Amino acid sequence: MTEIFELDLDYDLANHLHDSEAFAYFRAEGMTDELVEDEYIKKIWNWSVQHYRDHQQVATASVLEDTFEDLVIADALTAPADLLQRLRERYIKNQGRAKIRNLAEVFKTDPLDVAPTMLKVGRELAALTVTKGESWGSGDADRSIHEYHKQVARGPGPSHGYEELDDYFYGQKGITFWLGPPKSMKSWQAVNGLISNIMKGLNVHLYSLELPPYETNMRVRCMAANIPWWKFLKNRLTSEELALLKETGDALDDMGNFTVSKPPLEERDAAHLITLAGDAGADVIYIDQLQYLVDRNGVPIGERNDPGLYWGVGNVMRDLSDDIPITVIHQFNRSVMNADEMPAMQQAKGGSMVEEVGTLVLGLWANKDMRASGMMQLGTLGTRNYGLASWDLKVDMQRGCGFEILGRTSND
């Protein structure tokens, strides 16, 4: 017969205090010693909070055991969120009832004090028992510094595909849009970024909504091996190049992980795709292209070209990109036809959504002479965090398969 032990919530809290992530969660959710009933554990909690304030890191299990004579740190029996919920429920059952009974006494003494007292009690209970979620403010100095240290440890965001861009923008954050006219090699930028992030050891998911996923997959492999794309298109790959494709593919597999997929039309709403990739462990998501995402009725938003539909999709992506950086390939509208210079982001197809939602908006452009010489301009059209800049981009799709930034443009 299995012996059942009652879970001691207070002592299990002590088992979490050496875990920096668990400790940060408790602090972020407004955990205080009022939720702790055991006076010994309450003392340990308050000491741990002060230790963090003094040293900017949690006490180790050994330090805790050395400081508190009878304390033995064991494996926690609960997840931090589960434990905090249980502590809050216990507090409501025990202390909450007492506070409510006090209201009856207030009513007997002075009925006019009941309403303000109820508000005060309600705020106190909410502060201790309501999940905060993502909110910051007074009392969050320690938490803010802890979050900054986590940010430093993470380093730059996923790659944009070019060292120059990564140095300038410190990697991807939020939503990055790549804008260009039709047939301006925008989709290749998603492939280029995907390869760079695989080489960083990341898990990358690319939704190939315009091109067949097999074709995009082969673009990845040809670019990684620097094999001319036209050789694949014309079935001219040599045995040596096929061997190089296999060798390069194996090397990519050893470095990171990538998925190229094209879900059926009815499953192409932004929330579903981003959640699906996130559940699969994606560190960064590419969507090629925006206009092939669908609205709530399953209709591609580019089919109607209604700015309101673009806004609905953009708002969803904006919220979800807080957790996973997203790069979106998109097009300029018809107003850029025969343009003599790089268009503005306000000329993006679908209205002003891109300029409002995008964390960074990059543009691709080339005039007739530039295309003839294999050159393009890569420029910043909009950014929340950095200054505008542009670069000269060399394109090689004949002898190889790739792009190279030559430097900043002269009219930068």
Image: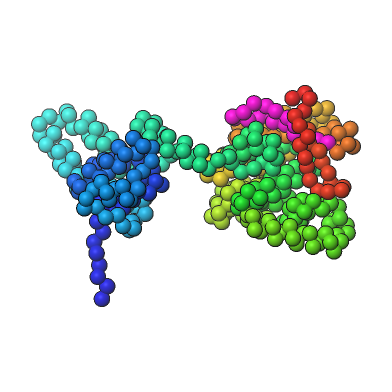
Measuring 75% from the left and 52% from the top, which residue is drawn there? 224
x, y percent for residue 347: 72, 31
Whether residue 374 is visible, yes or no, is: yes
x, y percent for residue 99: 18, 40
Q: Which quadrant is home to the C terminus? A: top right
Measuring 31% from the left and 53% from the top, which residue is drawn there? 15
Whether residue 175 is visible, yes or no, is: no
- Quick one: 393 or 324, which is closer to the camera? 393
Measuring 86% from the left and 34% from the top, which residue is drawn there? 370
x, y percent for residue 57: 38, 41
Count of numbered badges drawn on the protein? 0
> Toward which corner of the image does residue 372 lie, by quadrant?
top right
Magenta range: 375-391
Relative to 118, is 11 above or below? below
- Quick one: 283 or 42, which is closer to the camera? 42
Q: Does the magenta portion include 299?
A: no
Measuring 33% from the left and 50% from the top, which residue is drawn there? 61
Q: Does the magenta portion include 381?
A: yes
Relative to 385, is 246 above or below? below
Q: Is residue 290 left or right of residue 409?
A: left
